[in-house]
Image: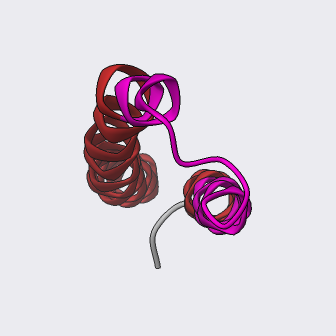
């Protein structure tokens, strides 16, 4: 099982970004000018891809950490 703390952290990050995106979409009804569109293009869209990459990276790292832990545990049992 991947490192539970790392996976929980990545899930929390993804959840927070989904909340940010949902809250941002709610502003569209009352704020739809060029400044809003520019802010979204320059700041929010790049964050989305960065969050996706971070979540995937954290989950991959958690799997590696768990494998290292298993390998080290197996070696200590051999000695």
Spot occupied by residue 23 in the image (x, y as percentages of width and height) = 74, 61
**Residue at image location 37% in from the left, 57% down from the top:** 59
55 inside magenta stretch: no
Which residues fall within the magenta stretch? 15-40
The secondary structure that dominates the magenta segment is helix
Q: Nearer the viewer, residue 20 or 6?
A: 20
Q: How is colour applied across the structure in the image?
A: secondary structure
Spot occupied by residue 67 in the image (x, y as percentages of width and height) = 30, 57
**Residue at image location 65% in from the left, 69% down from the top:** 22
**Residue at image location 49% in from the left, 22% down from the top:** 35
Residue 53 lies, with reference to residue 60, above or below; the image says above
Spot occupied by residue 79 in the image (x, y as percentages of width and height) = 38, 46
**Residue at image location 31% in from the left, 52% down from the top:** 52
Residue 34 lies, with reference to residue 14, above or below; the image says above
Spot occupied by residue 4 in the image (x, y as percentages of width and height) = 64, 66
Q: Of all residues shown, which one is farthest toward the bottom?
A: 1
Residue 15 lies, with reference to residue 52, above or below; the image says below
Q: In this view, does 28 lie to the left or right of 36?
A: right
């Amino acid at each position: 099982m991947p490192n539970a703390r790392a996976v929980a952290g990545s899930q929390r990050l993804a959840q927070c970004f989904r909340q940010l995106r949902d809250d941002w979409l709610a502003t569209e009804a009352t704020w739809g000018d060029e400044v809003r569109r520019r802010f979204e293009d320059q700041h929010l869209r790049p964050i989305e891809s960065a969050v996706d990459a971070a979540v995937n990276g954290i989950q991959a790292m958690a799997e590696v950490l768990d494998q290292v832990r298993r390998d080290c545990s197996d070696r200590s049992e051999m000695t």
